[in-house]
Amino acid sequence: MNTSYDIIVIGSGPGGYVAAIRSAQLGYKVAIIEKYATLGGTCTNVGCIPAKALLDSSEQFHQASASFSVQGIEIPAPMLNFEQFIKRKTEVVRQNTAGLIYLMKKNKIDVYQGWGSFIDNTHIKVKGEQETILEAKQVIIATGSKPATIPGVVIDKTRIITSTEALSLSTLPKSMVIIGGGVIGVELASVYARIGTTVTIIEYTDSLIATMDRELGKTLNKTLNKIGITSLLSCKVQRAENKGETAVVSYLDSEGKERELAAELCVVAVGRKAYTEGLNLEAVGIVAEKNGKIPVNEQLRTTAPNIYAIGDVIAGAMLAHKAEDEGTFVAEVINGQKPHIKYQLIPGVVYTWPEVASVGSTEEELKAQGIEYRSGKFPYSASARARASMDTDGFVKVLIEPKYGEVLGVHLIGPRAADVIAQAVLAMEYEVTAEDMYRISYAHPTYSEALKDAYLIAAGQGAINI
């Protein structure tokens, strides 16, 4: 087998497999290295995809338990088969990983299973069942990230676990403490609270999903409380201990008093950290930053001219779609093209219900920068489509530049926000004005109509739809 390639990709997550596929489409001979038995990285195997499968299943169960009778659907009280609940998630993951194997074959990409490490700039050792030396003209590092923790909290994968373990539990826990109220924390809280677990979130900042517009976090807190989730904000975790039958979390409350909280499981959801273990970056002169991330230039090239890095191992939001965009970007840069990525326009999404989505500047950012803006906010409680589906929690908020109407930011919490946000991304990418956005036709009744009314309000026209 010829082990010389134009491009080798290390890591098969969303960034890695997209980089490999786009490179192959451009005519390069490509190989991809993955240390695990399945392709897809964290997102496909223990992140985005399995989380969404469980979120959808748990929401179906919650609707059957809480809302069917209001809609005139009379059924016996639903019972949860937790084994099947997890089994369906596993099957969804299997289907996606099988799809990736197909794409590798279709695009004639060679797959090597094993641990990839640099020998020098053009040679990579793959240590699997047997050791193989590969040669490459260009290399793309896409090794992703792994769950992080905090001082005083040691993950034992028994009582003190990460999101990885939380997505594959063997039994339904009666209680759960989640350390961290970011995206991962609130999504896991939603899954388990809907199916009967008593869930408490302990968050260090004064808001859930604190990196997003603060109104989103405030509203999300209220909606999560409706399904029984308690959020302890402005609380600093001191330590977590496995006590045998329970995990005990000690924390300082908002007034600085030390308190304890016991639960069957403690889930650590304080973010993720770049994963470059075993790459032997020293051999190619790459020095990781203090946070473990690999420094790159505007072309995502490392200090080694023929080596690039993308996704969670470099600066920026740890999002699967960011990594995908960067995978395509690097392949096209290598090809001599001049692609671009507008990082400010990469949307953030939280798959709770209601969903949360955001793109562009938040109000807090605009105020801090002294930028003038006008806000238009439309509640889903005034949306005919939302009333029809009983999804009236949340709102759409658009922020526009007052003189010309340029859209500066769009923030949603409501039904299908993850899909609706794409329209806002399109508007901002092509610098469409708020007036342009409210003058186009929106199907009635739809969730996206709330955007039209928000644009109208921001432009000083006033809402016209229900």
Image: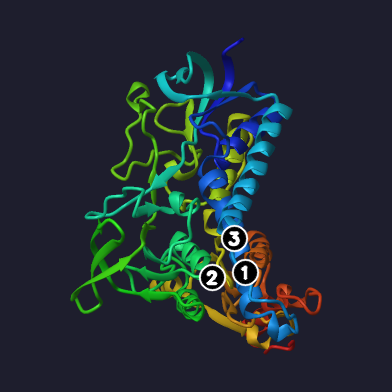
Q: Are marks 3 and 2 in contact (CB under 8 Å)?
A: no
Q: Amino acid at mark 3?
A: Asn
Q: Which residue is mark 2?
A: 194
Label 3 crowding class (10 Å Cα cut-off): few <14, some 14-19, many 20+? few
Percent position of residue 107, x then y:
71, 28
Which residue shows up at 48% across the image and 42% down it?
298
Q: Which one is earlier in the sequence, the residue at label 2 or at label 1?
A: 1
Q: CA distance from mark 3 to mark 2?
A: 14 Å
- Look at the image and tell me whether residue 94 can be seen: yes
Q: Which residue is mark 3?
A: 81
Q: Are marks 2 and 1 in contact (CB under 8 Å)?
A: yes
Which of the two discs, 3 and 2, sits closer to the camera?
3
Q: Amino acid at mark 1?
A: Phe
Assign the C terminus to one quadrant of the image: bottom right
Q: Which residue is mark 1?
A: 61
Which residue shows up at 72% across the image and 78% down it?
449
Q: CA distance from mark 3 to mark 1?
A: 11 Å
Q: Which one is earlier in the sequence, the residue at label 3 or at label 1?
A: 1
Percent position of residue 464, x then y:
74, 89
Q: Amino acid at mark 2?
A: Arg
Q: CA distance from mark 2 to mark 1?
A: 7 Å
